[in-house]
Image: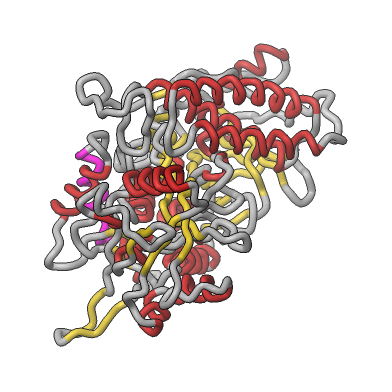
Amino acid sequence: MRTIDCDYLVLGSGIAGLMSALHLSRHGRVLVVTKKERAESNTNYAQGGIACVMDSDDSFSQHVADTLDAGAGLCHEDVVRDIISNGPAEIAELEQFGLLFSSRSTANGTVYDLGREGGHSQRRVLHAGDITGRAVEKTLLAQAQSNPNVSVLDHSMVIDLITTGWLADRASRTGNGPVPPPDGNRCVGAYVLDEVTAEIFAIRASATILATGGGGKVYLYTSNPDIATGDGVAMAWRAGLPIKNMEFIQFHPTILHHPKAKSFLISEAVRGEGAILVDAAGKPFMDQIDPRGSLAPRDIVARAIDREMKLSGAPCVYLDIRKHPADFLINRFPNIYAKCLSLGIDMAKDLIPVVPAAHYFCGGVEATVDGRTAMPGLYACGEVACTGLHGANRLASNSLLEALVCAALMADHLAEVPRSVVRTVAIPEWEYGSAVPSDESIVLEHNWNEVRTCMWDYVGIVRSNKRLERAARRIRNLREEIRQYYLDYLVTPDILELRNIADVGELIIRSALMRKESRGLHYTLDYPDRDDVNCLHDTVIRDEPGGK
């Protein structure tokens, strides 16, 4: 079996992964592994922008207050202050890399064209038109590809992390291979599947960084691309890492509802420019629910839309931004305007049909702001990590900010950590056992659809004990079937992704059952009120589900 050595192994090529790689390249050799094309990531689809204090009328304290308010009591205030105060320096670094944010001319010169989104008290969202994520991804990829200390491996999917604890257990169980040095359980790399050749190989690294993003594909309807299958969270859980706050899944309120539009997001910035949510008759309905109206935080807006659709029986609600002329909309939202127009919707004249869909994981692998997890040698950054910034509900556009800042802080920390000599750790050949090529791929498709439908029907925007318990039984049975399939047949990307979404589904369900209240993104009919006496704490799952 081929084994590749590097100083730093980064899993994922979105903003968290690429910024981690660029910072770490100053301290050693970095290998970035991504399971599809290197530009394919959640970052690439982010429209809104990066929330950061960049205006004299704004302040860190106001941004902190907005974040704490959206997070519904579960944000870690020290983490919030740390990330927000470090934001401007990381924006400056992005600009040094060549990223151009949208600007406008004033009597006092050129200034940032700052947007405003739900939950923000000020205009503080930096953007590059309405394709900010794509601009960030393009800029960072160009930097990575020109950096001699950064290599990028496409079409390579990580199967599982390799830890010294697992290696010792395997050596003891089989009697084969040397036992790794007894210096405690640590991560030493990962097993990887080449999606083109089907080769399984190992990567050995002093530090492994999870930057795998979120898992919107756990749900039937999502704004996320197909690659978002919760891989990092699932791998970390299988390796025994604590997983935190997985009940808090953010459903973006406004995904374009059209049979020819798959997962197309109508950015919250559209509401920031004055769009209001209306029913099929054109009647606004948000003002009677929250004084902030259509710019209330996402948890409130998503639940309001869900309620409106259920009461009316309508398949969607609508955004109305007809107050602005076409030239304004084309200039501010060129990508969204063009997409809508291609489907026969003129934003300047027509209502835009929208529905909520799974968008962002506020929970994930428990990690500090500088990426440290409970396991030496393993770090987590970006959406895969739960640092305490988002609490029970992410404030819009804080996610890219978190990825930028945490990547930099993690690199600063690792620069002070002596590189472990992991090359002395022998990594055994991948165990194929009696696995054979699959002739039952239809089973994968059925299980894939069943997991996602189950999660959407029973673990969505509005939950109940009955729905969650029903989901728990179904996911438990599905995970047993999937595990047996995984053992019986040669691994493929499809079975790896299916195993991961099922594992993540169980984590979400278990976390939701543990929270006996409604808070932020978790709303249950059985406990409709917030309980600060008994439930003002994070939800942490620490058990290991049984290894590989």
Q: Position of residue 133 (x, y in %)?
A: 45, 63
- Predominant SS along the magenta part: helix
Seen at 61% across and 23% down, the residue is: 474
Q: In the picture, which quadrant includes the N terminus?
A: top right
**Left or right of 544, for residue 370:** left
Span colored in magenta? 77-89
- Residue 420 in view: yes
Residue 30 highlighted magenta (yes or no): no
Where, quadrant-wise, is the C terminus in this rendering? top right
Q: Residue 533: x, y in percent? A: 20, 21
> How many numbered discs?
0
Residue displayed at 26% across by 57% down: 87
The x, y position of residue 80, in whole percent, is 24, 44
Left or right of residue 23: residue 489 = right
Please name the residue shown 67% across and 39% down the image.
Answer: 449
Q: Is residue 250 above or below residue 277?
A: above
- Image quarter of residue 371: top left
Name the image quarter holding residue 428. Answer: top right
Question: Does residue 87 belong to the magenta stretch?
Answer: yes
Q: Foreground residue, 247 or 167?
A: 247
Q: Residue at x 76, y 27 (%)?
A: 485
Vertical relation: 149 (above or below) 161: below
Residue 502 vs 174, above or below: the answer is: below
> What x and y, as percent, mark residue 10?
52, 47
| Vertical comparison of 146 with 301: above or below | below
